[in-house]
Image (cartoon, rainbow, N blue to C red):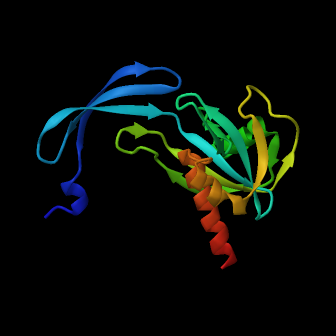
Amino acid sequence: MASYDERSRWVVHGERLVYDNEWIRLGLVDVEIPDGERFEHHAVHLNRAAIAVVLNDEDHVLLMWRHRFLFDRWGWELPGGLVEVGEDPMTTAAREVEEETGYRPTSIEPLVTYQPMAGMVDSEHLLFLARGAEYVGSPTGEVEADLIEWIPISDIQGMIARGDIWTSGTLIGLYAALAKISSATD
């Protein structure tokens, strides 16, 4: 008898590229589901993203107040960005923190990796935990945020409940960091 994993496996027979640019690739994947039915399923491929939870101590986290045009919505987010070809994701996370906030992390370590929409989107998100940061100057490049602030960790749950923190990378990063901090103090 096949294992549970094998009974539910979808078989991929190929993929046809529909759209491609430096940010996004859209394909139609020829798949066969376990009952033998075969059809095309859409797939969105995005570059990997690296995101950092930056703590200046165990009591404050660095967040950016940003507008997201697609939803016409504001919210607090962690700094992060796309991993460049050949770049180590941890380097990306540290670089993005500095470019977007003007702070340079003093130490950084892996926190958690996840896929935000595994059923149709390939977009690996790698989250890192930075402990300590030094201010090195104003953010560089395009304006990423209206506010950059050290927020008390004690305020995070209320901000999430009010909807001030709503993006997946920020939610998962903060929850993972809070769990790690909590387990270290137990």
- Is 155 placed above or below 168 here? below
Nearer to me, 105 or 139:
139
Nearer to me, 117 or 67:
67
Furthest-front residue in view?
Answer: 162
User: Residue 183 at x, y = what percent?
Assistant: 63, 73
User: Residue 117 at x, y = what percent?
Assistant: 41, 43
At 39% from the left edge and 45% from the top edge, which residue is drawn? 118
- Is 89 placed above or below 112 here? above
User: Residue 126 at x, y = what percent?
Assistant: 57, 48
Q: Quadrant of residue 4?
A: bottom left
- Is 160 placed above or below 95 here? below
User: Residue 85 at x, y = what percent?
Assistant: 59, 32
Q: How many marks?
A: 0
Give the position of the C terminus as an image quadrant.
bottom right
At 58% from the left edge and 48% from the top edge, which residue is drawn? 163
Q: Quadrant of residue 26?
A: top left
Residue 29 relative to residue 46: left or right: left
Residue 50 relative to residue 38: left or right: right
Residue 43 relative to residue 167: left or right: left
Give the position of the N terminus as an image quadrant.
bottom left
At 80% from the left edge and 62% from the top edge, which residue is drawn? 57
Residue 28 relative to residue 156: left or right: left
Q: Quadrant of residue 43?
A: top left
Furthest-bottom residue in view?
Answer: 186
